[in-house]
Amino acid sequence: MLVCRYWRDVVVDTPELWSTICVSPHDSIEKARRRLSRSKSVPLDVTINFSPRVDNPSAVTENIVRAMDLLRPALWRTRSFRLSVPNRPQAHAALLRCREDAPFLETVSICVYHSMQDDHHPSPCIPLFNGYTPRLRSCSFTSFNFGWDRRIMAGLRVLHLGGYWNGYSPSVETLLDVLRSCPDLQELALRNMTDVDLDHLMHHDQEFSATKVVKLPRLTKASFYYAGNVRTRLLLSQITFPALESLDLGYLDNLTPILEHLRQQSLTSLPLRHLRIESSLFNESKFVNLLRRLMSLTTLELIDIEDISCFLLKSLSAPPASHPWISPKLERLNLDGCTTLEWDALRTLVESRLAGKSPQLPSVPVSATAGPRPVSSASASAYIHALASTRCNSPVPGPRRLSSIDVTRCHQISKEMVQWLRMYVRDVRCESVKSIWGDSILP
């Protein structure tokens, strides 16, 4: 874009506009050098990103080293540093040049794309930034071997660890030591890690029984995605999280012991608002007992839970007499890939949670339900609204109306059933139904 020299002088003489520096296959080192000189002394946001799709690895290593040599004199004023490289030797070659103090550094992200590559590096380049990062609050390490140095991980607010396999995966003791050094931690994510050895499980249980519990009073978001069932269970048994609002559990095999730890935490305080479970097994009655304690839950996601039955949906539909609703604030329900759920149970759940409906409303006569019932008829709609208009005064407060349901990849849910759901739920997500010409009929 062509502008007059006055506007050009304004842009060139404003260092804040040049504080973002990126080096990648699409951003040359010459461009980074120009931005670095124009940024003067303002804090920098540095990104070095080379994907593993580049054909010439030696040229990538050379460009990474050249970029770090260029940026090394300005590391003292770096505010965020993000490094993404194909393999570990390239990451160590770059971080060998991060020996200076980083007094303004707030965010560090190091990602090694080839996490499964067995390229042992004998000497991890520690300490990073000379061990002096007083403002560091966010760390994200993916497949990077940094020797689990506590100096760079102390006092964090956000911690993401992933891509550690076999001998590189952290032990439970190591993770607990890291968490002890981060009492103000607000977000924790563990992804793609080899689980701890089952042979030492009994030894760990006896050792942890006498270990002081790690208190994380500000932890609001946690994610355990293929982090190992034993590791996750032992961690949750040794930490307290009274402010947790969002929890993701994925690919953890049998979740029942983990759900029990969550229930024990809920006996004191567990204001969970978002719960996501993916590709795992659990005991439904134990899960329902946990949901009874989650009075603040607004979003429940069950992804690829193939053994879910009508028991769970019926438990969410109507409580026994004089009992409170289970998760009365539930508004968003995601059942993506749950191919075994029954339509009648889902329909009953939606009807029971209509706005203003009381749990003590009269039920549908047996004679009226004996025959086939159309899922999108006007009589069904009139009957539901008649029930809502004749509600009685009940001491048990009613639940919130469902505002979103996701039945993607639920092949047992037909197009007519989706149309019925859309009569009472504002946002219904499903797979597109295409015509013979390939056009989308049902979004």
Image (cartoon, helix red, strand yellow):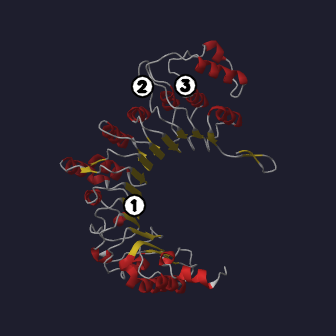
Q: Quadrant of residue 389?
A: top right
Of 389 and 145, the residue lying toward us: 389
Disc number for residue 113: none
Q: Position of residue 149 (x, y in %)?
A: 28, 69
Amino acid marked by disc 1: His
Which of marks 2 and 1 precedes in the sequence? 1
Q: Quadrant of residue 270?
A: top left
Can see residue 339?
Answer: no
Residue closest to the far front:
6
Q: Residues within 10 Å of mark 2 (few under 14, many from 20)?
A: some
Of 28 and 166, the residue lying toward us: 28
Amino acid marked by disc 3: Gly
Disc number for residue 160: 1
Are the residues flagged by discs 2 and 3 in contact, CB closer than 8 Å?
no
Residue 211, placed above or below residue 32? above
Look at 41% across and 80% down and name the residue there: 41
- The local secondary structure at tag 1 comes to strand
Lateral position of residue 276 relative to residue 103, left or right: right
Q: Would you name the residue on which mark 2 appears?
A: 324
* Mark 1 vs mark 2, CA separation in Å: 37 Å
Can see residue 149?
Answer: yes
Instruction: From the image, state whether disc 1 or disc 2 is nearer to you.
Output: 2
Instruction: From the image, state whether disc 2 or disc 3 is nearer to you.
Output: 3
Q: Position of residue 6 (x, y in %)?
A: 60, 83
* Mark 2 vs mark 3, CA separation in Å: 15 Å
